[in-house]
Every structure is written in structure tokens, then in C-alpha cells.
């Protein structure tokens, strides 16, 4: 990824392919001038260079005297644009031929094809947004649920950035006084109030810990909550998956051991994305291939955020044993016990089971009864409280790593203060904490870092 250039870039901003309309975006110092030279207004001899910013104009894009298409041209003048440069967006008809004709016309006029994420990179380099907000743009584009959309929007609005910048600025103020003390080391002068500094370090440590802990929630809200459906063969795991997905995704058969590999699909329930994994039935078998599937079942349980443990209603006398076996094997795992094939039970048996075991779900995947109770329970377990309360939630793994590094550096500073070591020893840790906090917002960047981040963006954004 190259540093910012003064050239003008172009890209298709809408999805590739045929559509009703397409939007082609240009950005750069000469963007308006270049488009203007190939634009004939429908209303008089209009000059795009002199029109007001944030205005739309109807006319034709022409190549010499050949009309390529009738278009709407939106003009955004620097610095009040997405990139902070002159930006032009051309709304043309969605023919792939027309899109390419317009793009190739401007490339012939000296415009360059934009790199992935280059418009947003220019916005960052021109100070229109910080790095964490720029990354949220990519998350917003890829969001596939209400909650992942909310997390991305929260970050784009700058709540997370403001919190990090505030912490960094307070630490920077004290760091300046510490550095000043080092310059006057021989005079043994203290400029930084140690009690006040200790309080600040404690506060920063607490905030960083809260943000780090929020990643567990933020990551699953962004990528979907992984849920493993487990149980013995023929308990109805594949039927439950098909019922939740409302399609025949998994093969259902009365023959035991039909599912030999994990089958995975994603659905949206009450604004949250869930990744359901139908696993091979757990049992003792001599079948080599089935054993591989069972091994994968245990691997998926390890990776799952939540386990749906299905038990056949015809085997309720083995219920306690089955529950204990799984919970003893995975004591820290969140496991939801489900009795399937409820149609085999009497009302009294159902009532007795519910009174014996709290949070037990009884349903019939085949007859689609009791499914609402399951989906309601999943929504409650999703723990959207922090999101609803507008708390800062970290969902980016790069931010998570930087926060961890900053937290570790701050803990070293705390140790230094407590041990009353020389200022110059913990001054190094303060610089490290400042560096890692700066990495998040982009106050500290490298070419490689920007390259890695913006290479994941789509062309045109």
C-alpha cells in the first residue's frame, strides 16, 4: 500500500454486474475538472468546477461527440467529502458495458484504477476519520445481522476512538512530566504527582481490562455465535438443524451414524447471527470414518460458544447420566439441555421433567413444536445488554491485541510505581503503552500496517 498520492482515482462503488443503476466514484484534486471535460449538462452549458458542493446534475457523459450514457453527477468539493479531496460520483445505467465505457474513458484521460480500500485510506490520511473508524467501514459493509451492524456503527461514530484517545492524552500528559524529570535527574526534582499518577494508571488499567473483556462478546456478535448441536445418533440433531434453517440442509435417516461430518449453516434470530453446527452422533463404534466424525464433534464442542445437547425423549431415564457425562467433560462450557421427540411424552412426564431440571427445553424438531422456546432462550443467552446500553464493545482482533499489549505495559508501570523504582525504568513501559494505544487510532502507523488493513476492503470503498 503506497502512501497518499495527488493523482485521481476511479472505481465502481456499487456491486459488479448488471443492475438498474451503477455508481462510479472518482477522487482526487482533478476529479471535478476531468469529469467536467466529458460532461454535457441537460440544462445549459453548466461548469461542474463552479457549481456548489453537494449538488447533483443531470447530463450526458461523452467521449468527444459520442454519448456514452445519460447520468446524474454528484459533486463533493474538498475538504467536505468522504475522502477530504474533490469527489465525483456518477450515477449511470447498470449495464456492464456502460460501466466499463465510462471507467475506461477516464482512465484514458489520466485517472488511475483505485486500489482496494483506497478511498477510505485517503479519508484516514486526510484526517476525515481515525484508523479504528476506517476499519469499522469494512465491518459495516460486511455486517450480516442487526447486532454486527450496531457494533460497526458504534465504532464508526467514534465512541471507541474517543475513549482510547482520552486515555492516551491523559497518559501522554503525565509521560511529558516524567520525561521532564529525566532531564533534571541530577536535581532530583519531581514534576509528576505520584499519587495522581498512580490513580490515573489504576483507572487506565481498569478501562483497558473492560475493553479487553468486551471482545468475547464483540467477536461473536460480529462473526456469528457458534453453536454445536450434539447428542447420540438418531436423537434428531439433523432434523433440528433443518427445522431451524427451514430447509433440508442435513440428511435425515433412521439409520444411525448418517451424519459423519460437521454440517454448518448460519441463521439470523432476533438480529443476532448464529452459526449452527450439526455434528456426528456420539457413540462407541468400530467404523473408522464415523470415528473421525465423532472426533470432529468434540473439536466443535471446544470451539462452540454454546452447546445444544439433545436427548431422546424415549431415554429420559438416562437423562441425568447424559447431562453429567457432558458437563463433567466440559465444566466451563455453556450447555443447553434439550429433550427432543416431545410427542413421545405425556403431559405429566413433561411437567415432571420441567420441575426436576431448570432451564430444560422440551421440543419436537420433527413436528416443529417448542422451537420458539429454544429461539427465545438463545436470544436471552446472546447477552445483548452491553450493546443495548451503548457500551463500547471491541470486535476487531487487531484492536484486541493492541489493547492487551497496552494493558501489559500499564501493569508494568503499576509494578514500577508500587516498587518505587527509578523513573527512567518505568518510563519505557509508559512509552510502550502510548505506542500500542496509538496503534488503534492510527496515531502510530506503518506502511505494512495500513497495507494489511486496507487490502481487506472492497474496491470502490
Image (spheres, rainbow, N blue to C red):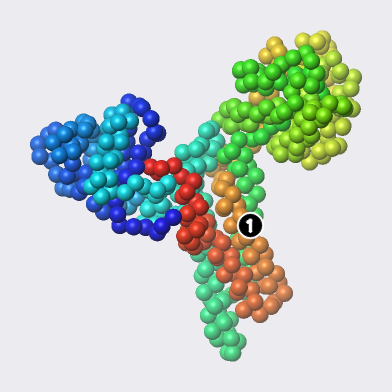
Which residue bears the numbered disc 1?
404
Up-down relation of residue 460 to residue 19 (above or below): below
- Please identify the quadrant where the C terminus is shown: top left
Does residue 39 appear left or right of residue 2 in this picture?
left
Is residue 289 something that shows in the picture? yes
The reply, left or right, for residue 1 in relation to residue 147 is: left
Of 277 and 309, the residue lying toward us: 277
Q: Name the image quarter holding the N terminus.
A: bottom left
Does residue 433 appear left or right of residue 311 in this picture?
Answer: left
> In front: 4, or 408?
4
Q: Is residue 207 visible?
A: no
Residue 310 against residue 292 in the figure, above or below: above
Task: Report the side of 16 relative to 273 (left or right).
Answer: left
Name the secondary structure under disc 1.
helix
x, y percentage for residue 124? Answer: 41, 54
Mark 1 burial class by Cα count in 10 Å: few <14, some 14-19, many 20+: some
Residue 343: x and y, percent? 77, 10
Give the percent coordinates (x, y) of residue 304: 71, 36
Q: Quadrant of residue 386?
A: top right
Amino acid at each position: 500500500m503506497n502512501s497518499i498520492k495527488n493523482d485521481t482515482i476511479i472505481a465502481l462503488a456499487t456491486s459488479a454486474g448488471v443492475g438498474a443503476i451503477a455508481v462510479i466514484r472518482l477522487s482526487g484534486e482533478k476529479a471535478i475538472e476531468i469529469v467536467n471535460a466529458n460532461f454535457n449538462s441537460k440544462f445549459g452549458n453548466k461548469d461542474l468546477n463552479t457549481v456548489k458542493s453537494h449538488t447533483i446534475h443531470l447530463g450526458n457523459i461523452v467521449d468527444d461527440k459520442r454519448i456514452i450514457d445519460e447520468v446524474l453527477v454528484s459533486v463533493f468539493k474538498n475538504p467536505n467529502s468522504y475522502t477530504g479531496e474533490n469527489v465525483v460520483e456518477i450515477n449511470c445505467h447498470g449495464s456492464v458495458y456502460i460501466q466499463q465505457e465510462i471507467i475506461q474513458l477516464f482512465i484514458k484521460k489520466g485517472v488511475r484504477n483505485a486500489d482496494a480500500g483506497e478511498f477510505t485510506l485517503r479519508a484516514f490520511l486526510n484526517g476525515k476519520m481515525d484508523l479504528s473508524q476506517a476499519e469499522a467501514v469494512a465491518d459495516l459493509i460486511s455486517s450480516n445481522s442487526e447486532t454486527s451492524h450496531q457494533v460497526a456503527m458504534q465504532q464508526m461514530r467514534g465512541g471507541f476512538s474517543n475513549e482510547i484517545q482520552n486515555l492516551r492524552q491523559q497518559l501522554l500528559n503525565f509521560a511529558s512530566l516524567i520525561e521532564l524529570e529525566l532531564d533534571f535527574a541530577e536535581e532530583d526534582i519531581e514534576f509528576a504527582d505520584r499519587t495522581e499518577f498512580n490513580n490515573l494508571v489504576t483507572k487506565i488499567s481498569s478501562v483497558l481490562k473492560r475493553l479487553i473483556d468486551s471482545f468475547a462478546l464483540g467477536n461473536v456478535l460480529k462473526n456469528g455465535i457458534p453453536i454445536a448441536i450434539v447428542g447420540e445418533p438418531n436423537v434428531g440433531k439433523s432434523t433440528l438443524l433443518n427445522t431451524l434453517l427451514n430447509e433440508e440442509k442435513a440428511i435425515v435417516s433412521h439409520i444411525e451414524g448418517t451424519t459423519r461430518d460437521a454440517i454448518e449453516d448460519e441463521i439470523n434470530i432476533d438480529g443476532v447471527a448464529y452459526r449452527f453446527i450439526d455434528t456426528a452422533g456420539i457413540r462407541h463404534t468400530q467404523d473408522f470414518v464415523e470415528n473421525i466424525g465423532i472426533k470432529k464433534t468434540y473439536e466443535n464442542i471446544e470451539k462452540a460458544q454454546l452447546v445444544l445437547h439433545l436427548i431422546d425423549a424415549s431415554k429420559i431415564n438416562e437423562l441425568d447420566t447424559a447431562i453429567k457425562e457432558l458437563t463433567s467433560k466440559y465444566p466451563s462450557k455453556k450447555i443447553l439441555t434439550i429433550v427432543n421427540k416431545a410427542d413421545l411424552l405425556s403431559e405429566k412426564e413433561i411437567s415432571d421433567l420441567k420441575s426436576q431440571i431448570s432451564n430444560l427445553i422440551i421440543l419436537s424438531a420433527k413436528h416443529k413444536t417448542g422451537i420458539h422456546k429454544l429461539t427465545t432462550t438463545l436470544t436471552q443467552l446472546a447477552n445483548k445488554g452491553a450493546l443495548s446500553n451503548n457500551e463500547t464493545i471491541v470486535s476487531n482482533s487487531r484492536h484486541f491485541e493492541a489493547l492487551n499489549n497496552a494493558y501489559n505495559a500499564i501493569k508494568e508501570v503499576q509494578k514500577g510505581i508500587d516498587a518505587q523504582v527509578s523513573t527512567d525504568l518505568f518510563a519505557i513501559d509508559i512509552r510502550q503503552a502510548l505506542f500500542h494505544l496509538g496503534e488503534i487510532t492510527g496515531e502510530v502507523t506503518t506502511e505494512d500496517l495500513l497495507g494489511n488493513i486496507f487490502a481487506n476492503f472492497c474496491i470502490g470503498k
